[in-house]
Image (spheres, helix red, strand yellow):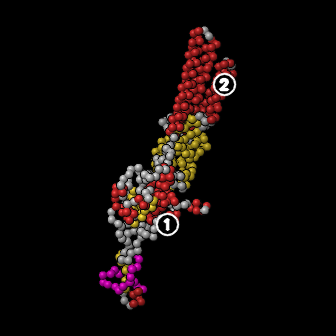
Amino acid sequence: MISFLRQKKSFRFVLTSALLTGAAIGAAAISAIAVQMGESSLASLSSKFALGLALLIVVYVVPRLAQSLHWQSEYALQVPNAGLVFSALILIVTVLALVSGNNLLYLVLAVLLATMVVSLLISRVMLKRLAVQLRRPAHLFAGETAPFEITVSSEKRSLPSFSLTVEVSEEPLLSVAGQAPARKLTELTYLPVLPAKTQARARCDRTFSRRGVYQVHGFVISTAFPFGFLEQRRFIEAPEELIVYPQPQALADVVSLLPLSQGQLESRVKGAGSDLYAIRPYLSSDHHHHIDWKATAKTGRLMVREFTRDDDWRVTICFDAQRDSAQTDEAEFASQFERAIGLAAGLVTHFLSAGAEVRLLTDREDSRFGIGQAHRYELLRQLAQLTPNDANDDWSVRFPELMGQMPGAEEPFRVLLTPVSRTELPLLVTRAAHVVSFGELAAQSSPAERDAK
């Protein structure tokens, strides 16, 4: 739909430009024919009409062509509303001067044209020899406000720059359901004045509403100084990718769907752990560091402490990103998919904070088991880049380990997030992992909805 509207707008612009150009050429041809026929009045009127159409073409066509070439060149020109009004005034004075031949109107026309030329030249000088740097947090989460620090440096020797607006050009690489990703400009800061050989720092708070990967193309510095009739823009290329992590969902909202008490099994086997297993008499093979001196003093004989063995607490989160063929509503599926992403992020955060080894398994990537904050951010990065997959692979291809043997005491605890209903899954899958369907997540009410009730 968006591409159709853009094509319709472009077709309208091309048609209008062609009609104006054809009318101007026709008026010029009539003027030339009238001169050969000796019709001086018709020739004068036709030439003035052709000149007026030429000025109208300049006012209508040139700014839009400059705007369409905005990303292909370093500098671009845009005419704001004040500039359009001023251009219309120039056109009116031009027609009146040509019709009346009044020298005073020619003088006024010269002043108006000089004003436009001076505005063009000065605004171009304001943007020269400027550099922009951006500092941001190392980790960005959807829905959270993140501080960005912008530094604008001037390398000019003497001339300051006035009325600078700094924007960032970015494009989301993950499209929203029903919409095509489009490059957009986001204003970062406004600087009234930037002296020569100085730096100006400003801070702005940004909030990304959706998780995903944002492709940053560069920065755009614009100014309408001195009169505001023309706005010059300069594009500074600085490619970078911003990864916005999904916001972890509070597990309290879905506690009924997950047996969070499972997954960590209490050990009853002695070993080199940290929990006390028993106190027994000292043997010659025991290390002296394990002697319990309080028990020794009470019993009158050497006693040592034995500890339980620390069993590995491993959790595997399987995320099925394949689109459900039974789901026909794209918007509803996209909403359910994002909720599942948030739940997966919440599970990763919960289990890693509890000290478990967590593994994220999708049909595209296997993170392997890991612990710590670095591993958490790596799993969140994978979730941020995850998109629905239209391929209809069998379960033995997607998650072959779920089709194997049932997990025993030494097997990891598995959670499967899938758009498929639990009743439609193979028996081996439902017995090998705890299944959470996307539809079950959609049925859970949010905290705001519960408060409203």
Q: Nearer the viewer, residue 391 or 61?
A: 391
Picture coordinates of residue 177, whole percent (x, y):
49, 48
Q: Quadrant of the C terminus?
A: bottom right
Q: How far apart are marks 1 and 2 (CA)?
A: 76 Å
Query: Cβ–Cβ below 8 Å for labels 1 and 2?
Result: no
Magenta-span inclusion, residue 445: no
Crowdedness near tag 1: few (<14), some (14–19) or many (≥20) residues, C-alpha within 10 Å: few
Q: What residue type is labelled 1?
A: Ser
Q: For this view, does 226 lie left or right of residue 254? A: right
Q: What residue type is labelled 2?
A: Val
Picture coordinates of residue 184, whole percent (x, y):
52, 43
Classify 303 as above or below 427. Answer: below
Magenta-span inclusion, residue 282: yes
Residue at point 40% right, 66% down?
A: 413
Residue at point 43% right, 67% down?
A: 355
Q: Can you tell which mark lies on residue 93?
A: 2
